[in-house]
Image (cartoon, rainbow, N blue to C red):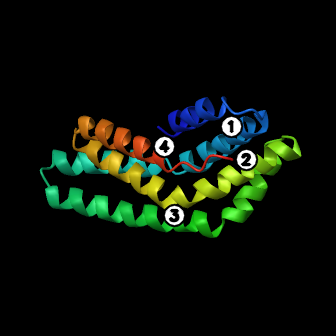
Amino acid sequence: MVPLAGLIDVMFLGHLTEIRHLAGVAIATILFNYIYWTFGFLRMGTTGMVAQAIGRKDNQSAVLIGLQHGILALILGLAILIFQKPLQILGFAILSATPEVKTSGVDFYNALIWRAPETLINFVLIGWFLGQAQSSKVLLLSAILNVAKRFREPYFH
């Protein structure tokens, strides 16, 4: 859903008169995809471990796994916030763009980086529901979160 959310941002910004905002959002979205999918193990690991616990009919372990992984996601999300400036500098140094595009990308990055804990905890929730074979709840959770994010999106003026 992270790439899909980025696509929605790009679709919205494509209607602005200055292309630099669109390009800035595009490179910031690429950077977020790399940052967040570095922690994709939170979803996959949670799914596997919860599925094993459910297979053993050990619901208490499934809940404990969800809580442990949720705490880990929160800690990692806070670490991303602590290291947001070095991540920003490194990411935008790797992704080449004009200074105007980088400025727009940095503005978008600075607004969205605060979602890191939420995003990583969402990975755990998705993994927890998938591990319990409740994929319909994953779809509902993803849809609600993405619609909610669109209403608080920091678009440029």
Lateral position of residue 114 relative to residue 26, left or right: left
Picture coordinates of residue 88, whole percent (x, y): 72, 57
Mark 4 or 3, nearer chain start: 3
- Residue at 15% from the left image edge and 49% from the top image edge: 56
Mark 2 or 4, nearer chain start: 2
The residues tagged by marks 1 and 2 sit, at their Cα atoms, a distance apart of 8 Å
The residues tagged by marks 2 and 4 sit, at their Cα atoms, a distance apart of 18 Å
- Residue at 62% from the left image edge and 33% from the top image edge: 10
The residues tagged by marks 2 and 3 sit, at their Cα atoms, a distance apart of 23 Å
Q: Which residue is mark 2?
A: 105
Mark 2 or 3, nearer chain start: 3
Q: Which residue is mark 1?
A: 26
Q: Which residue is mark 4?
A: 150
Q: Secondary structure at mark 2?
A: helix
Query: Circles 1 and 2: CB distance less than 8 Å?
Result: yes
| Foreground: disc 4 or disc 3 | 4
The three-letter amino acid code for the residue at tag 3 is Leu
Picture coordinates of residue 103, whole percent (x, y): 79, 50
Q: Which residue is mark 3?
A: 76
Query: Circles 1 and 3: CB distance less than 8 Å?
Result: no
Mark 1 or 2, nearer chain start: 1
Q: Residues within 10 Å of mark 2 (few under 14, many from 20)?
A: many
Q: Quadrant of residue 147?
A: top left
Q: Secondary structure at mark 1?
A: helix
The three-letter amino acid code for the residue at tag 4 is Arg
Query: Circles 4 and 3: CB distance less than 8 Å?
Result: no
Mark 4 or 1, nearer chain start: 1
